[in-house]
Image (tube, helix red, strand yellow):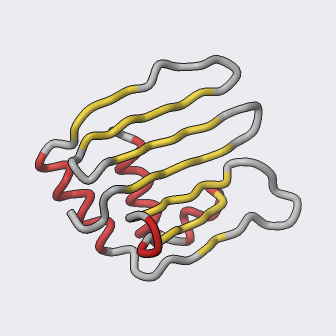
Amino acid sequence: MPYLPLSYRVVGEDDYMLEIEVAASGDFEINSGDYTSHEPRRGTLSSNQRADLSHLLGQLGDAREHPAPAGASGFVAALTLGEGDQAKVYRCWEGALSEDPSLEAVVRALEVL
């Protein structure tokens, strides 16, 4: 899958965070928390999940940013595809996800792992 590894991170308010890492092998780890901590969840993408995610990632196009409007706080997300100099980074205030349906579809697919 040419879009792996990938990383999706959200930093929110009240110590909320979500981090999803998917390795090139398809193994994933999800860390999340707020004022309490949660044990990381781990697994491996099924062949259907790999195919679906690959299709959705292929729809993204060029890396771009959707910044938060003035006065908005928290819930800033970053999706990083690949690594090193070849990495593509999509930054987005979560309130703007609906403005980018292809990015929103990737995020929703990752959130249900």
Left or right: where 1 falls relative to 39? left
Which residue is nearer to you in this view: 69 or 78? 78
Q: Where does the N terminus fall, quadrant-wise?
A: bottom left
Whether 29 is drawn above or below 70: the answer is: above
Q: Seen in the image, is 59 located left or right of residue 68?
A: left
- Quadrant position of residue 55: bottom left
**Residue at (13, 50) in percent of width and height:** 48
Q: How many marks?
A: 0
Q: Residue furthest right?
A: 71
- Where is residue 74 shown, x and y percent of the image? 75, 48
Is the C terminus in the top left, top right, bottom left or bottom right quadrant?
Answer: top left
* x, y percent for residue 42: 33, 29
In the rendered image, the vertical position of residue 1 relative to residue 76, given as above or below: below
State the residue lying farthest toward the bottom: 62
Query: For this rendering, which residue is in front, 5 or 12?
Result: 5
Left or right: where does residue 109 sit relative to residue 52?
Answer: right
- As drawn, which residue projects farthest toward the left? 47
Where residue 64 appears, as percent x and y from the top left, is 56, 77
